[in-house]
Amino acid sequence: MRQLLLLRHAKSTWDDPMLSDHARPLNARGRQSAAAMRRAMHDLGLAPDLVLVSSARRTLQTLAMLEPWDDTPLIEPLDGLYLASAPQMLGILNMVAETTRSVLLLGHNPGLHELAMLLVGEAAMTSGSPATRRLAKGYPTGALTEFTLIGPWALLAMGGGRLTRFLAPGDLPEMAA
């Protein structure tokens, strides 16, 4: 079985109107929530073999906050993940080597939320598990979904993932307001 982790970048700032969207950095709350997510991922034993990350500054900074890893994954920054649609992300995942057991894809909304919903599939949406219902409501900054995949990366498609968990920074004790 394979594991797919989808992580939306942590909260970023809009303070500098001169910066392009691609260059926007994390704000203080984003850095705090990314560090909290790192601890949660470590506690849950979530350790990817491969990290596919958007080349945007806020995604790269979120990734930096997840380090250090117990076993350093291969990290691939990809321009094609910047504001990618769900089909574009799915195409990138379809090219992952079959020997890769676990992938973390770190990207942006709305594509990341759409990809998560696509992987859950319509049949699972009607079953209405608590995690699925939460996912359907939105994908906040810094949120993580974990999917178990049975088939090969090359055949990953709609309904191809079993949602294992949906974890938002607000679920973490150190981030509770």
Image (cartoon, rainbow, N blue to C red):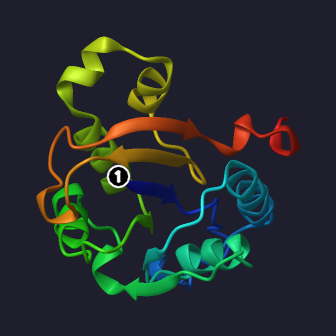
Quarter holding the C terminus is top right
Q: In which quarter of the image is residue 80?
A: bottom left
Q: In which quarter of the image is residue 41?
A: bottom right
x and y, in percent, of residue 116 in the image: 34, 44
- Give above or below for 42 relative to 70: above
Q: In this view, does 156 lie to the left or right of 72?
A: left
- Give above or below for 88 relative to 21: above
Residue under circle 1? Answer: 1
Q: In this view, does 7 lie to the left or right of 25?
A: left
Nearer to us in this view, 10 or 37: 37
x and y, in percent, of residue 84 in the image: 28, 67
Residue at position x 14%, y 65% in the image: 154
Q: Is residue 143 left or right of residue 69?
A: left
- Give above or below for 168 relative to 136: below
x and y, in percent, of residue 148 in the image: 38, 45
Nearer to us in this view, 162 or 82: 162
Q: What element carries label 1?
A: loop
Residue at position x 12%, y 57% in the image: 155
Residue at position x 78%, y 57% in the image: 39
Q: What residue type is labelled 1?
A: Met
Residue at position x 43%, y 64% in the image: 102
- Total tally of numbered discs in the picture: 1
Q: Residues within 10 Å of mark 1 (few under 14, many from 20)?
A: few
x and y, in percent, of residue 153 in the image: 22, 63
